[in-house]
Image (cartoon, grey):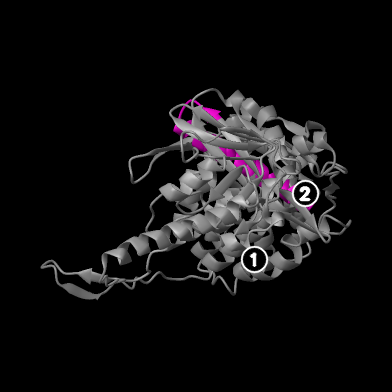
Amino acid sequence: KAAKNIADVIRTCLGPRAMMKMLLDPMGGIVMTNDGNAILREIQVQNPAAKSMIEISRAQDEEVGDGTTSVVILGGEMLSVAEQFLKQQIHPTVSMIVVFYSKHYFTHLCDFYFLFFHDTDLCNINSVPVDVNSREMMIKIINSTINTKALSRWSSLACNIALDAVRTVELNENGRKEIDIKKYAKVEKIPGGIIEDSCVLKGVMVNKDVTHGRMRRLIKNPRIVLLDCSLEYKKGESQTEIEITQGEDFARILQMEEEYIQQICEDIIRLKPDLLFTEKGISDLALHYLMRANISAIRRVRKSDNNRIARACGARIASRTDELREEYVGTGAGLFEVKKIGDEYFTFITECKDPKACTILLRGASKEILAEVERNLQDAMQVCRNVLLDPHLLPGGGAVEMAVSRRLTERSRAFTGVEKWPYHAVAQALEVIPRTLIQNCGASTIRVITSLRAKHTQEGTTTWGVNGETGNLTDMEELGIWEPLAVKAQTYKTAVETAILLLRIDEIVSGQKKKKKDGRPGGAQ
């Protein structure tokens, strides 16, 4: 029941007519979203089964980035349909409930995503291969994800931003494709302006200003040096004591510090860079030498930002200044510019020749809106990444669930007695996705779901599903609603494995000690 209650909380957040939730976090902040993972992340629950449902939403988000609402709804329904067997005092492992979920799941249900590549007895749906080089097709796929989000009003802009960002960070090395969105596609949110001002920079932006006011704030074709060390005199790691017996000794110590700073600055100046980024601090004396050499310097840059700059301009990060060589200098950037947006200064490194890192600049009315736009964009980029890595699609709108449900119903006819019950149970559970889509757009649930069942009994109708906008039956292929194979496969695997886990639990035992009325600890509950 706890798992089903969690599923009911986010049931209205599925589909293009999804409702949003407004959550108050423990710090007093407001979260407005219809993303399943973002909602469940803010909910505080005590029941262990409910915590398991929240965990599968997080796992789905980390693995494929989309389908976080569907996986919880499907997992909750799997447990709900098994409840009737438990009420009849049928043992879970004997009555074929867990046996079906664990055995037949792997042989029939979960393997559906492998079987899409072949015409098999279980499922006659064929996944559609995608031409990843077709921009129009890729935007159509991403649009299917964006249309269920709050960002659907700006779907064209969001789809182009997501596709451009993923294409920028895509890296092919020795036949291996790597798309690391988390590290190299940074989203920078700046309140103010309108959402239409959002864009993907052909380079990197960091929330920093030059260290000295007289340094250059506009450089074309800059030579960039990146450091992982400080331009300050090294201090002792532990307590350091120096005994001075003569007055000249103190002057000598100061001179040694100045000579050290001068040496590391000369190592940098020798390469004639225009721009210097360091993750650590820069002393006033080092600033003086860099100013004289007409080098703009930015200090205390995040390591993640430093890595993005290195990828964008082709530079290499040096840990010591005496390691610097010509190949460490980045020359791939076309423009360095510092702009003031609102009350803050931002450094832009743009017009890069072949950037393998980018920054997505988001503008909007408030922080809450920007946070939701970022969540929606992250989902869109994850979908784009999944398609590029595994270019196969399945029809959306509940078409896959109805097709698998019908095939399981047909297969159940080969069994008699108690063995056929789990087949009907799982077939019924799969219908929760199209049923929820119908409920969320206000259509007649019984009439439409019955019509959809009847439609799927006909030949060549496996791509028919529910139009989430109107509640009518539509061919998803004509409507252009597609889901990545990786997302659907992960949804099924996660939901059914969670059902297996929770159905094997017969009792919850707390290991916490219960306090007595006088405040002293008592025995375990």
Q: Does residue 255 appear left or right of residue 240 in this picture?
A: right
Residue 521: x %, y % from top left: 19, 73
Is residue 65 visible in the rendered image? The answer is: no
Residue 404: x %, y % from top left: 75, 52
Q: Secondary structure of the magenta portion, mostly? A: helix
Magenta stretch holds residue 384: yes
Residue 96: x %, y % from top left: 63, 70
Residue on which the image places disc 1: 101
Query: In front: 440, or 51?
Result: 51
Vertical relation: 405 (above or below) 353: below
Is residue 4 visible in the rendered image? The answer is: yes
Chain part drawn in magenta? 363-390
Residue on which the image places disc 2: 388
First of labels 1, 2 by sequence position: 1
Q: How many marks?
A: 2
Report how far apart the C-alphas of labels 1 and 2 lie in the structure. 31 Å
Q: Residues within 10 Å of mark 1 (few under 14, many from 20)?
A: many
Circle 2: residue type: Leu
For the C terminus, the quadrant is bottom left
Q: Residue at x 31, y 64 (%)?
A: 248
Q: Does residue 525 appear left or right of residue 470 in this picture?
A: left
CB-based contact (under 8 Å), mark 1 and mark 2? no
Query: In front: 425, or 262?
Result: 262
Circle 1: residue type: Tyr
Q: Does residue 316 appear left or right of residue 138 in this picture?
A: left
Q: Nearer the viewer, mark 1 or mark 2?
A: 2
Secondary structure state at the residue bearing disc 1: helix
Residue 361: quadrant of the picture: top right
Residue 369: x %, y % from top left: 49, 31
